Image: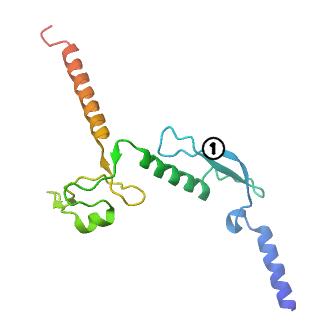
Amino acid sequence: MEAARAEVSRLEREAAAATCAEIGHSWKSIGGCNAACENIDCGCSVPVHECEVCGDCDYGQNAEADEVKRTCTEQMMLDEPDYENRACDVCGAKTDDEAGKLCKSYQLPSGDYACNGSPEDESYPDGRLRFLSEVGIAGINAWVDEMVAAHEKTATDSPTETE
């Protein structure tokens, strides 16, 4: 019994001398901050905690914030009008799993493989393939036209060497 009391006493002394980083902070909420999700217009807020013992702050970097950011990013992907879920024009796959079995990929000169259907690298969170939609294609084409027009204007506005 005496040995057990001595061990408890030793552990209590160690715990009293230990830092919060070693034994765990005693967090309390002190407000929130912007989640800084991938969506530029994001208004998501995440909790900010401060340790009641040592005063350390997590600055919104915590498990709750990770979940808020993940959920926001997933919703942003689902709401993005430039992309759509549809079957691959080449292999008919609608999900990552199907594409892995059905994809009629081809080898590039670099040695890498690519899908003829050209889905985006990042699928929807539930594994559905993402493809550019007609809206997305029109947006890219409009941007390219704008860049070409700006380049042509710059070229015609520049003085020639004979002037």
Q: Would residue 110 be found to the left or right of residue 84 on screen? A: left
- Residue 62 in view, yes or no: no
- Rendering coords of residue 107 (x, y %): 16, 61
| Residue 108 rendering spot, x and y as whole percentages | 16, 57
Question: Which residue is at 39% across, 55% downward?
Answer: 124
Position of 41 with respect to 19 (left or right) is left
Q: Say how the picture is coloured.
A: rainbow
Name which residue lies at 30% across and 49% down.
131
User: Residue 113's image quarter?
Assistant: bottom left
Quarter in which the C terminus is drawn: top left
* Residue ID for mark 1: 33
Viewed as shown, does residue 4 lie left or right of 76? right
Tell me how many marks there are.
Answer: 1
Q: Is residue 86 visible?
A: yes
Q: Amino acid at mark 1?
A: Cys
Please identify the residue farthest to the top as the structure is shown. 163
Residue at the location (30% across, 53% down)? Answer: 86
Badge 1 marks a residue whose secondary structure is strand
From this view, report whether residue 147 is shown above or below residue 115: above
Q: Which quadrant would the N terminus be assigned to in this image?
A: bottom right
- Graded by Cα atoms within 10 Å as few (under 14), some (14 to 19) or many (20 or more), the crowding at tag 1 reads some
Q: Nearer the viewer, residue 163 or 150?
A: 150
Q: Position of residue 44 (x, y in %)?
A: 57, 44
Q: Residue furthest bottom?
A: 1
Q: Nearer the viewer, residue 113 or 128?
A: 128
Q: Is residue 42 left or right of residue 86?
A: right
